[in-house]
Image (tube, helix red, strand yellow):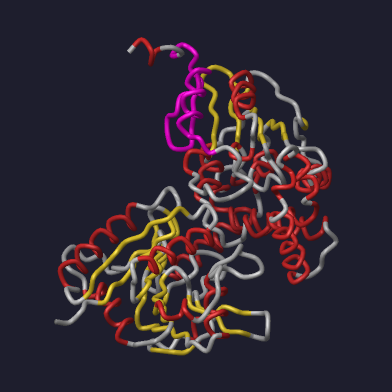
Amino acid sequence: MTIKKTIMIGIPCFAGVSAETLEDYMRFAYYIGRRYQEYNFVLAIKSKTEQFRARNAIVLEAKKIGADYLFFLDDDHVIDIDGMVGPSTRYEFLRTMIEHDKDIVGGLYWQRGGTFNPVALTQMNKDRYRLLEAKEITGKMQEVDVVGGGFMLINMEVFDKIEEPYFEPEHPYSTDIQICRKAKQAGCNIWLDSSIEVGHVMSEKQVIHSHNIEHAMSERHERLERQKDPKKFGHLKFMPDRLTEINNNYRVDVMEYLNISTEEELIKLAQEYVDHYNKIDNYKDNLPQYYIDSGKSYLARSCFVHDVNANRPFDKFVLEVLKTLGKGIDFGCGGAPVSFELARAGHSLWFNDIDGNECYEFLKWRVKKYKVETAGFNTYPSNCDYVLCLDSIEHVEEWKRLVNRIAKSLKEDGVLITNFITLEDFTNKEHVFMDKPAFLSYCAKKGLWQTSQYVFKKNTTMIGASKEN
C-alpha cells in the first residue's frame, strides 16, 4: 500500500481578509479535496500580529504531524485570477510545484503598490537583495535567491538542515529572505516557477496581476498628481491610498532625527532592540522604564513595523473612518505615523505616551518640524469625538484605569478605535494584558459597547442593560 504524503497549508492571517480571497481559498480547498486524492492535507492558520511568530508556529505544527511539505500561503492572494465559476485548472499549481522536486519553490505574484515588481529577489552582495524586474521573468522555472513567502512550497527536509528559530523579527530581513537565505547557506536550492501566477489583493475590490498591472500603475500616477495639490483635491479624501507614502515619509523623518544616512545604519540600530527585548524580565516592576531605556533602537524598529510595503488593514481603517475632522486622543501613540497625518490634516489631536520614550520624543520633534497645530501632549481632554489605541492597550498593566480615562474623555456617541480585540500574539513579553473577555466586560460597565472588530461606541444609557436582560 502506498503511503500518502502530507501537505501542511500554512496561512499567517491578519484580520480583514477580503471576500475575493475567502471565496477563492474555499474553492481551492474544495478542489484539492476532490482532485488531489494522492495527498493528505492539513490546514494551519495563525495570527500574524508579528509575522515571524506566526510562521514559526506553523512550522512547528507541520513538524508535529510529520508533514512532508509545507505550503505557505498569505491571506491576500487570489489563485484563480481568471475568475472561473466552476473548477479551475489554476488550482493544479500545487501538484506542479511538488513534482518539481525542489527544496523551495515559489510562484509568481506582484507587489500591490510601489514599483509593482515581481515578488522574487536576487542577491546583490553578501547583505543586499533587490527585487527582480518584469523583464527578468522568464515564464518558466528559474533559479533565484528568494521567492515570495506568500506563495512558497518548502520540502520539510529543509528544516532539518537549518537551526531554530527558523524565522526572526523582520529586521534586517523579511521572513521570506530569512528562510531562503538560511536554506541556501545550508546547501538548498531556491526556484521560481514563473509560469504559475497568482493575484495579490490590492484592496478589498482590486486584485493585482499581470492583466491589469499597467492600469494600476496609471492609477497610482494619477493619485500622486492629485496629492500635489491637497487643497484642491482634499487632503483627507485620498489618505487611505497614501499609506505607503505615509510610512515612507515616517522612515525618512526617523532617519533625519537619528542622524542616519543609510538603510544599513537603520537596520543595525533596529537590531539592537532585540537585545533590549531579551532583558524585559528585568523591568517587571517598572515597565515604563523599559520603554525609556529601549532608546533609539525602539524608534528604528518602528520603521520596520510600519514598513513602506506593510499590509496594515487597521491603519487604513483609521484613515478611512476619520475623514471628517474631529477632536481626539491617541493613547500610547509612540511615533504616531498614522495619527500624525490626521493632525496635519486638521484634526485636533492630543498625543499621550511615556515622556523620555524615544518614539514619543521623535513625535514632538516632528510636530515642531512641520509646525503642526496639535492640541497637546499627555493630557486627557473631555468631549472627544474619538480615542485611538493603536497597538497600545496590550502594553498597559493598569488597563482599567485607562478604560476609565477613555470613557471620561469621550462624548456621548464618541468612539474608541482599537485593534486590541484582533490581536492574537500572546507570546510577546511586552503584551502584559491580553484578557479580551475582561476588557469587553469592563468596557460595557463604562458604557463602551463594541460595534465592530475595531470600534467601541460610548452609550451610557445602555449601562446595566445586559444585566436586566
Q: Residue at x 58, y 18 (%)?
A: 411
Residue 158: percent from left, percent from top: 45, 80
Q: Which residues are magenta?
A: 434-462
Residue 366 visible, this angle:
no
Residue 63 covered by magenta stretch: no
Q: Residue at x 23, y 70 (%)?
A: 40
Residue 23: percent from left, percent from top: 27, 56
Q: Residue at x 52, y 49 (%)?
A: 425
Vertical placement of residue 96 versus 463, above or below: below
Q: Quadrant of the C terminus?
A: top left
Q: Is residue 290 left or right of residue 178?
A: right
Vertical placement of residue 358 versus 354, above or below: below
Q: Residue at x 43, y 12 (%)?
A: 464
Q: Nearer the viewer, residue 182 or 111?
A: 182
Q: Quadrant of the N terminus?
A: bottom left
Q: Nearer the viewer, residue 97 or 140?
A: 97
Residue 458 covered by magenta stretch: yes
Q: Is residue 291 left or right of residue 16?
A: right
Quarter of the rendering containing residue 356: top right
Residue 220 visible, this angle:
yes
Q: Nearer the viewer, residue 449 or 217?
A: 449
Residue 102: percent from left, percent from top: 39, 86
Q: Is residue 340 left or right of residue 259?
A: left
How many marks the image carries: the answer is 0
Q: Is residue 125 left or right of residue 115?
A: right
Quarter of the rendering containing residue 92: bottom left
